[in-house]
Image (cartoon, coloured by chain):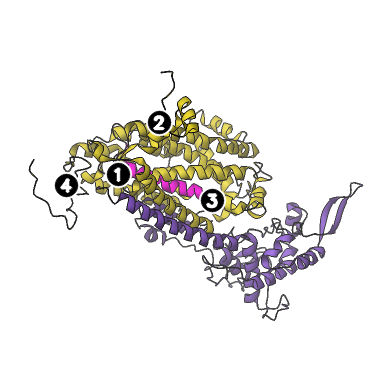
Chain colours: A yellow, B purple
Amino acid sequence: MAGMTKSEFANPVINWIDTRLPIFTMMQKEYGVFPTPKNFNYFWNFGALAMVNLVIMIITGIFLAMNYQPNTELAFSSIQHIMRDVNYGWLIRYVHQNGGSMFFIVTYIHIFRGLYYGSYKYPRELLWILGVVILIIMMATAFMGYVLPWGQMSYWGATVITNLFSAFPIVGPKIVTLLWGGFSVDNPTLNRFFSLHYLLPFVLVGVVFLHVAALHITGSNNPLGIDVKSPQDTLPFHPYYTVKDSVGICVFLAVWAAFVCFYPNVLGDPNNFIPANPLQTPADIVPEWYFLPYYAILRSVPNKLLGVCMMFGSLIVLFVVPWLDTSPVRSLRFRPLMRPLIFVWVAAVIVLGICGAHKPEGIWVILSRVATVWYFLHFLVIMPLLGKLERPLPLPESISHPVLGPRGGGPLPGGAPAKPMEKA
Amino acid sequence: MRKLKSLLAGVVMAGLLVGPVLTATAVAQEEGAMPNERWSFAGPFGTFDLAAAQRGFEIYANVCSNCHSMKYLHYRDLSGIGLSPDQIKAVAAAVTVPLGVDDQGNPKEGPATPGSQFRSPFANETAAAVANGGAVPPDLSLIVNAREGGPNYIYGILTGFVPAPSTFKVSDGMYYNEMFPGHQIHMPPPLQDGTVDYTDGVANTLDQEAHDVVTFLAWAANPEMVDRKQIGVRAVLFLVFMTGMTYAVKRKLWAGVHH
């Protein structure tokens, strides 16, 4: 395939480059004229939002690293130096700190979108799997980032979470020593976490690239979950979806700015304003909100090893969702039984999140057990069985002719009485 | 805080509002009821009452600083509560701080400059613990952010020294405080009516003193707050405007698309 491209760009400089390295042709193909289903709703904003979020995190993170000291003696005060003495350091820091939460909000909604509209099904299985890889890398990055300020919750969170690996027989304690770089959470731990926290976002960029590349091979799913059948079903990505994504980006940045400027610490824990003290354990050790559901699953099981396995299992199970779901229909709009059940699953995750924030006593233990069982039941039993038992609603003929009305099966929009069939 | 966190987990994933119902049951029994005071700096538009913060600094300088450090602050930072450069120089010059070593290698002391860190009352943690019956007085730079309840909690501690109930046995060297978890605190009651003589004519009641020092501490923990909120108003207004603009463009662009 060696040989120069015949570039169509009029600008001679762009044409010269494009002939030798056709990146402009590629951008034009993938983001300019890229045929995109024309019926996206605003749920399809969240991939772009996550991308924007990742870029902002990397930029703010680079500036933070210029002033941060990954040393147990200095880490906490270097953060205070950033907050008080570095020009707009507080802004960069709060954008980054709240950006972690924003990233999870956006990603969780993105995942829900995938589950609701069956975006993981043939032919998008690998796209979904890469997404789960992104989620796991993101979680590792967020966890290590939370350790860096070296406050009480940083230290004790790191201690509790790294200790989980000790549950594995034989290799467990060795893994923990390796993570710590010693025999307790200490300076070597902080050093390696800083190093990895700087590295992993760039790994994320790589996996995100693959995620997007895979998306551009299969093309996007859409709210009807049916395949694109003709060019009438699609619109060029630019300007239609660049402008629609821009609307979402503005709203998203407004929410982020409101958190940063008005409630920068509302999602954090007061204990992290106290420097790490290995001799004093906080009254209760709670992870950041985005880890609470997993934390609840972990604590709902009396056996440590089983609890750890269940916690990791709650993520691992996502990898096989494309094969657990046996239904031929993608979008839950046409699956009358699964549609309510996905919301029951979401409710179970929320209940887990709430349980994770409370001490595992009394009602919280029972609730977290019920919700844990439901979490796995949904994937392992309901998904495979319902796909076979459920009778889906009739699917529209195509995206351009959703004969059953915009929501499939719903009433036609007002003012548009059903016209008699035109003569062929 | 925890309630908010669980709430967010809820709102985020679907907005199903089981949160308030389930979280409402969690109530701490060990601690006193959290006060709910009015603060000049509360809410999205609140700013620091600078006169109160200055009175609060006076209390810190005369009372709290005998035991509590504020090591993340420098005297120059006091411009944030409205002190002039000359006032700051005067405040700093009145304090003796360690100044490294002299040319013979001996530790040197001298008057602080605006660039000096706030003087710490004890040379190190061990010295602080020995002088205070084993309990290290916490650094106050971030104390308002570092406690559940924030300013209300600190106010509750400062005003929470009441006679112990007859059934409650207070250990030697401890004081009864209705706000403090477990009700026994090493800190003797730091403020009473008239502890500090205000020069601006404000009544120096315990309540007023506690309010003032908490205002100062809230500023110390979040010196960027006023700037932050001002930027926030502009940023959010701008982004709301941009949302409207882009939405209008989107509507116009999509007008011809049947979907």
Identify which amino acid the numbered label 1 is placed on: Tyr
- Give the letter of the chain under mark 3: A
Q: Residues within 10 Å of mark 3 (few under 14, many from 20)?
A: many
| Residue B245, x across and y down, in percent | 41, 56
Which residue sits furthest top? A2
Q: Which residues are magenta?
A: A98-122
Mark 2 vs mark 3, CA separation in Å: 41 Å
Look at mark 1 in the image and give the residue it sits on: A116
Quarter-of-image position of residue B147: bottom right
Of mark 2 and mark 3, the one earlier in the sequence is: 2
Look at mark 3 in the image and give the residue it sits on: A95
| Residue B101, x across and y down, in percent | 86, 49
Of mark 4 and mark 3, the one earlier in the sequence is: 3
- Residue at horizontal 59 percent and vertical 45 percent from the top: A155
Mark 2 vs mark 1, CA separation in Å: 41 Å
Quarter-of-image position of residue B77: bottom right
Foreground label between 2 and 3: 2
Where A23 sits versus A409, above or below?
above
